[in-house]
Image (tube, grey):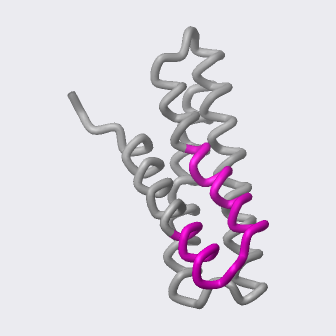
Amino acid sequence: MKPNIIKEKSFNFAVEIVNLYKDLVNSKKEYVMSRQLLKSGTSIGANVREAEFAQSRADFINKMSIALKEANEANYWIELLYETKFLNDEEFQKFKSKSQEILRLLVSIVKTSKD
């Protein structure tokens, strides 16, 4: 069985988002934006997992499209946390790069699936 890249990357991203959330809450006392990031950042992988056992092609596209929307939202919260000085340059670059990669993969999957 070949590796499912989006499944692996979205899960690993979720783990890193959970750890970032814990750090933001514990050390920086930031609760609102970090919670939004936690929700969107972990939802990506959950929707990818749901798509694995989609009932139809349309269901698969729908789940992957939701994952794409969540990835875009996570990207927004990462940018906002950076601009409000809750993320330093290194953290921002790390999370921005990973979220952009996931976004690109999901765009490709959704477009290919619609063809």
**Image location of residue 14, percent across then percent down:** 50, 54
State the image quarter where residue 108 is shown. Answer: top right
Q: Is residue 40 magenta?
A: yes
The quadrant of the picture occupied by the N terminus is top left
With 8 as the anchor, is 2 left or right in this view? Answer: left
**Image location of residue 96, percent across then percent down:** 58, 71
The magenta-colored residue range is 20-44
Q: Is residue 85 above or below residue 65?
A: below
* Residue drawn 72% across the image and 89% down it: 85
With 40 as the anchor, is 42 left or right in this view? Answer: left
The quadrant of the picture occupied by the C terminus is top right
* Residue drawn 73% across the image and 58% down it: 36
Q: Is residue 32 above or below residue 79?
A: above
Q: Is residue 57 above or below residue 14?
A: above
* Residue drawn 63% across the image and 73% down it: 25
Q: Main secondary structure of the magenta part?
A: helix
